Image (spheres, rainbow, N blue to C red):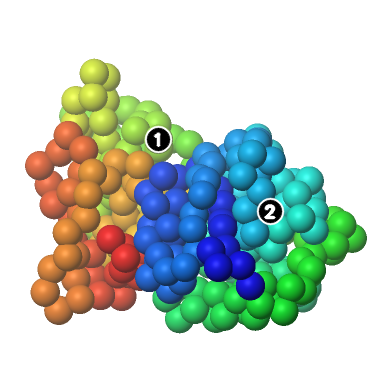
Amino acid sequence: MAAHPTALIADDEPLLREALARQLAQAWPELAVVAQARHGREALEQFEAQRPDICFLDVHMPGVSGIEAARQIGRRAHLVFVTAYDHYAVQAFAQGVLDYLVKPVEPARLAETVARLQERLQAQRPALHTEALLQQLAEQLQSHRAPAPLRWIRAQVGPTLRLIAVDEVDYLRADAKYTRVAWRGEGGQPGEALISTPLKELLGQLDPAQFAQVHRSVVVNLRAISHVTRGEHETASIHLRGRSEVLPVSRSYLGLFRQM
């Protein structure tokens, strides 16, 4: 195995890219993350420029997907796919011999992947994936594609019925029988509204690559997070850009921010 193996991380969410890089630094200090990419096309450009030994590719990225990028990289690197869609993707990956990680990445699962990669590099084994296997995986994922995520939330604000773009939502919080929606309106002004749709029902309609449940009563837009601070008893607090509210992260959901 090379003295300093190298890696590329591709994910369209900066927070998740950085979190995985930190987790890898803990689990595999000798590994050098030489490039990070925001989408599949940039991943391919960075791969050609850096030629890393390992590529961690988010499956669902805008434009060129992680699967498509993997097919172009071929056997020139060891691939690890990262996915938020564990309800169907795990089965697809497990049927092949491809490595995968499910968001939020658990340290124990990452340690297993690191051990396998170290063994393959030490033995100078070729990458395991094949074009046929990637084609089969692409077809499986396509056939199990999740429904299009929710784009708008209808909310009564005083006498006005508002259509709130989901991308403008900072967080959602269960409030008795209702859900409190906190969003950023025109000019970045914060707004709030109560809707009758339960938080659990809304969660199933949101894009899991953008929204994460961090408490039994709180779902947050990952893009709205400024920083996360650790608390006592394996808890944490989320601070949002441009908002004074501090959101709780309970022990059950701390995995997403464990390395922050």
Looking at the rendered structure, the secondary structure element under dot 2 is loop
Answer left or right for 124 relative to 166: right
Q: Residues within 10 Å of mark 1 (few under 14, many from 20)?
A: some
Quadrant where the image shows the N terminus:
bottom right
Location of residue 233 in the rendering, given as x and y in whole percent from the top left corner: 15, 79
Any part of residue 166 in sight: yes
Residue under label 2, please give it: 145
The residue lying at 27 percent from left, 36 percent from top is 183
The residue lying at 49 percent from left, 58 percent from top is 32
Distance in Å between CA atoms under marks 1 and 2: 21 Å
Whether residue 62 is situated above or below residue 76 in the rendered picture: above
Q: Amino acid at mark 2?
A: Arg
Residue under label 1, please give it: 167
Residue closer to the observer: 45 or 195: 45
Number of callouts in the render? 2
Q: Amino acid at mark 1?
A: Asp
Answer left or right for 42 relative to 142: left
Whether residue 65 is situated above or below residue 135 in the rendered picture: above
Outermost residue toward the right?
A: 132
Location of residue 179 in the rendering, given as x and y in whole percent from the top left corner: 27, 51
Residue closer to the observer: 241 or 185: 241
Between disc 1 and disc 2, whose residue precedes?
A: 2
